[in-house]
Amino acid sequence: MSRAGHALAVPVGHGLWVVPLLCLALAAGVAIGETPISLPVVGQVLANKLWAAGYPLDPIDEGIVWNYRLTRTIVAAACGAGLAISGLILQSLLRNPLAEPYLLGISAGASTGAVLVALAGLGAGALSLSMGAFAGAIAAFLLVAALAHSARGMAGSGQIILAGIAGSQLFNALTAFLITKSASAEQARGIMFWLLGNLSGVRWHSVMLAVPVVLVGLAVCLWHRRALDAFTFGADSAASLGIPVRRVRFVLIGCAALVTAVMVSMVGSIGFVGLVIPHAVRLLVGVRHARLVPLSALAGALFLIAADVLSRTLIKGQVLPIGVITALVGAPVFALILIRGGRR
Amino acid sequence: MDMSMADPVLACEGLSYAVGQTWLLREVSLAVRAGENLGIVGPNGSGKSTLLKLLSGVHTPAAGEVRLLGQPLAKMRRRQVAQLLAVVEQQAETGDAISVRDAVELGRTPWLSALAPWGEEDERIVRQALRDVAVEHLQARIWHSLSGGERQRVHIARALAQRPTVLVLDEPTNHLDIRHQLSLLKLVHTLPVTTVAALHDLNQALGCDRLAVMEQGRMVALGAPCEVLTPERLRTTFGVHGHWLTDPADGARILRLRQLPSHESIEGNSPHVQ
Ligand SMILES: Nc1ncnc2c1ncn2[C@@H]1O[C@H](COP(=O)(O)OP(=O)(O)O)[C@@H](O)[C@H]1O
Ligand SMILES: [Mg+2]
């Protein structure tokens, strides 16, 4: 009997259907848009670019597919996967169903960093805004981690959650202070739009960063899948099952923080993915991380590809912030999951 | 076995533990012999759970040392410890919808690695552990649908699946009905492992080879149950009046416990009075 979830072969076995599914979703994400582009044309553009196949194509179509839609679809997928596994890690390690990637103060820190850069006017490019956001995210996380570390007296995982709340409040207040003090209405609107999640600034350099970061995060999680399982009955129980609790926490929470910080710095904070996707996948496939980790990543990727398509097509001539879509879809879906889950 | 009976399997020396300024455990030294069933008794809050957490390496002592098979616990890797020593905690709960089978399989965690993936042997050990505590029929059940006693038995099956040399149990019979209490204690005593168990019921503790009595974080007595649980000890440590009876049916010695007469009520002996 080969029970799923035991051998390393299991995550590999999923590859048989996960990879084609993901490719199909990516292709659909590229094809659908305000100007629909047929799947064969998408394929021909890819063939031209990757193998210099030399199909005669409209250069505008080619530009849209290669520079605009393909990049944002890939980054959407990477973000979805990254946020989903980050949320999963935090829920599993902290034993708190409300844990999510932004719990660690990361999005609040990112917004402060981005606003600082925007107001100080250190170059106008999206790249510098991203760098400010990344620096802010990491600074906030380090502060939260230090706070949690010094609050030793408290039991278990409560400390990092409370530290995260304190850190988030502090950085949100800083952001609000900076915006009201010095930003024009126009600047404030731009910043808010960016904070709600925005994939329009995404180009190939973002792909080159997002994809490796997510793959490394995924590999780290899969490597620790049994350790994550061992936390089912809490940290003391994990310790008695032979898990070096502190080291595993350090590595995995650090990994979640880094992945989230990279994503936030590229596309702003996209809510609900990191909270809802792990819960939904848990209801579907159970609690063993050999299945949970890869399938959460997949579900997160598919969800954000779909959300991105919706954000581009829902209102003609206008792109909605993707965070609005994820919240609008995510909240009712989450409610449904809760009701269904309660009835089982 | 080439290990002589004199070599302790699990031992501690001058073990102390503090949270902030409060000492929860003071200078506890004991040695558990191979194959022995050691019981730890004491009133609520006397430090039984704390002692077990230090012995199993879940907490790090403020002073003193624990040795497992002669090696200092502090120098061993967690995984190595978990291959030798399994713990059944007093309270270990989860909100996850984990199945009984999956929960017991967690016991194999210290034995699995990338080079040693799940195999037939693990399968067999898990099945045996489920059978040992009679929860085979619950295999597919989800955690939150189990009763307190069923949960406790699953935890014990998980610990057995670890195939430990030493089994540490914190009030293992707490949620069980009397039939399962007795069968569990019998199982624990017949297993070919060394056990250290905090026990609530003094009469059940009589089944242990030796008892350690805890009082306000100190170990105040260690020895055979009938030597340790003297009327004097029962009065000072537990605040109850007790004397020994002999069961006419089989000649077994049992403890009859009563409340102290009101003039020597427990005020003077309360374990919480510093
Ligand atoms: N983290 C802690 N901080 C402060 N006091 C604690 C902590 N954990 C346990 N205690 C106290 O230590 C004492 C011993 O606890 P414990 O070992 O759980 O006792 P027992 O298991 O014998 O009932 C109790 O008085 C308890 O209140
Ligand atoms: Mg206790």
Image (cartoon, coloured by chain):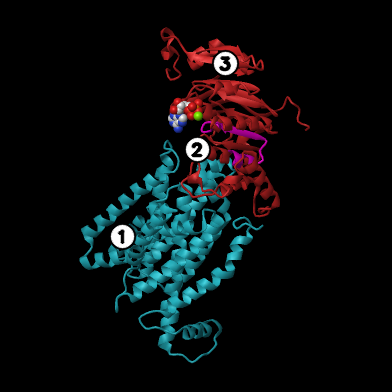
Q: Give the residue drawn at x 60%, y 33%.
A: B168
Local SS, label 3:
strand
Badge 2 marks a residue whose secondary structure is helix
Q: Which residue corresponds to the image point at 41% horizontal and 42% vertical from the top-left?
A: A158
Q: CA distance from mark 3 to mark 1?
A: 74 Å
Confirm whether residue A10 shows in the render. yes
Q: Which residue is disc 1 drawn over?
A: A116
Q: Which residue is mark 3?
A: B255
Residue found at x 48% / y 53%: A89
Q: Which residue lies under the disc numbered 2? A: B148
| Label 1 SS | helix
| Chain of the residue under the numbered disc 1 shown in the image | A
Residue B164 within the segment the image draws in magenta: yes
- Image position, residue B261 (x, y; %): 44, 9
Rounded to the nearest whole Å, what is the CA distance between mark 1 and mark 2?
54 Å
x%, y% of residue A200?
Answer: 36, 73
Q: Earlier in the sequence, mark 3 or mark 2?
A: 2
Q: Quadrant of the C terminus of chain B?
A: top left
Span highlighted in magenta in the image: B156-176
Residue type at the position of mark 1: Leu
User: Position of B70 compared to B153: left or right?
Assistant: right
* Residue A263 falls in image quadrant: bottom left
Against B159, residue A335 (above or below) is: below
Tell me the colour chain A is drawn in.
cyan
Contact (Cβ within 8 Å) of mark 1 with mark 2: no
Q: Residue at x 41, y 82 (%)?
A: A64
Give the residue type that dot 2 points to: Gly
